[in-house]
Amino acid sequence: MYIVKRLIGMLLTIWIIATLTFIVMKFIPGDPFASDADVFPEEVLENLRAAYNLDKPVPVQYILYMKDLITLDLGTSIVSDTRSVNQIIGSGMAASATVGLLAMAIALFFGILLGVVAAINHNKVIDYMSMIIAIIGISIPNFLLAPLLIKIFAVDLHLLPVASWGSWKHAILPALALSTTPLAVVARYTRSSMLDVLNQNYMKTADAKGLSTYKIVFEHGIRNAILPVITFIGPLFVSLITGTFVIEKIFAIPGIGRYFVDSIFNRDYPVIMGTTVFYSVLLVVILFLIDVSYRFIDPRIKLTSKEG
């Protein structure tokens, strides 16, 4: 029953977001074909508006828009009328997901490791050094870190390629630039949660029984300390795999983030609405999966409305 309610809530959330996106687009002043007024005669512009249903009343446009969403048809780009929004998202998603997943893997692995090491060595030099690294990671914006990485690893050392997209090597530098902030946040979350877990009675009992630090931490501690981190991972995961425009622009990555921002400047309404809805669907699905995953990480959590 809990899962059914969550699924209904997901559909309702997606409908609200899609509706709000449509309304916002209608309130934006201007015409997506206004820049072509000096190029094409009025008859051609009217035909273009008719092709995108912009000549119809707003309620009719909304009904057609929702009908297309139900059939998973996000429309056709106004700027590139030979490509559908589905094709644009599909082509851009591959590059964005490659960089985002690699950045997430780096952030999770080193962030959790750094947080656990800091918690085990609480108030020691390693703890202070770990938190200094985390603070630096949060403080340095990725658009400043990216040129520095390019200078060191591409220009000076000639180890990694930039300004192009092809093999997996092209994803390393942008992934590193993207991973620093989430790595630092994951480290701080993990450290705080791990400190709380280490002070629990069952952890002290395990220590009193003579279990090794490795067994206590990795078999008993991390499983409970990871729950707050998982809550943070959901939205971060979606934001990383759907692309970050600044990083994609710096490294010339043909990702979804670049398409989205370009569509805003070009008033490409179908792409704006399509990518927004796609992002929203991805986000609510990931959050739903995270809620369900709690039950497998900690069997004490029940997926019922009464027990939370």
Image: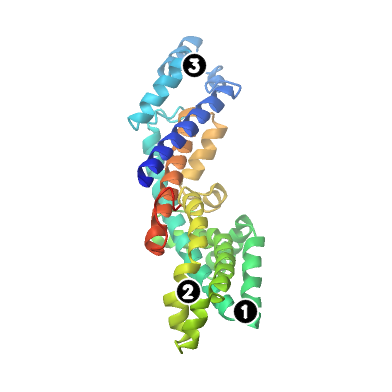
Q: Which residue is mark 1?
A: 122
Horizontal and vertical percent position of residue 33: 52, 21
Q: Is residue 154 visible?
A: yes
Q: Earlier in the sequence, mark 2 or mark 1?
A: 1
Quarter where residue 282 is shown: top left
When the figure is inspected, residue 14 is found, relative to residue 133, above or below; the finding is: above
Residue at point 40%, 60% (across, down): 168
Q: Secondary structure at mark 1?
A: loop
Write down the residue under mark 2: 221
Amino acid marked by disc 1 = His
Outermost residue on the left side: it is 71
Q: Earlier in the sequence, mark 1 or mark 3?
A: 3
Mark nearer the N terminus (3 vs 2): 3
Q: Which residue is mark 3?
A: 58
Q: CA distance from mark 1 to mark 3?
A: 60 Å
Q: Amino acid at mark 2?
A: Gly
In x, y percent, where is residue 228? Answer: 52, 61
Q: Secondary structure at mark 3?
A: helix
| Residue 56 sits above or below residue 116 on the image | above
Q: Please name the amino acid that badge 3 sits on.
A: Val
Q: Do callouts 1 and 3 mark residues in contact (Cβ within 8 Å)?
A: no
User: Could you say which is closer to the camera, residue 236 or residue 77?
Assistant: 236
Q: How is the image coloured?
A: rainbow
Residue 256 x %, y %: 46, 44
Q: For the residues marked 3 and 2, what is the alpha-carbon distance in whole angstroms?
A: 56 Å
Q: Secondary structure at mark 2?
A: helix
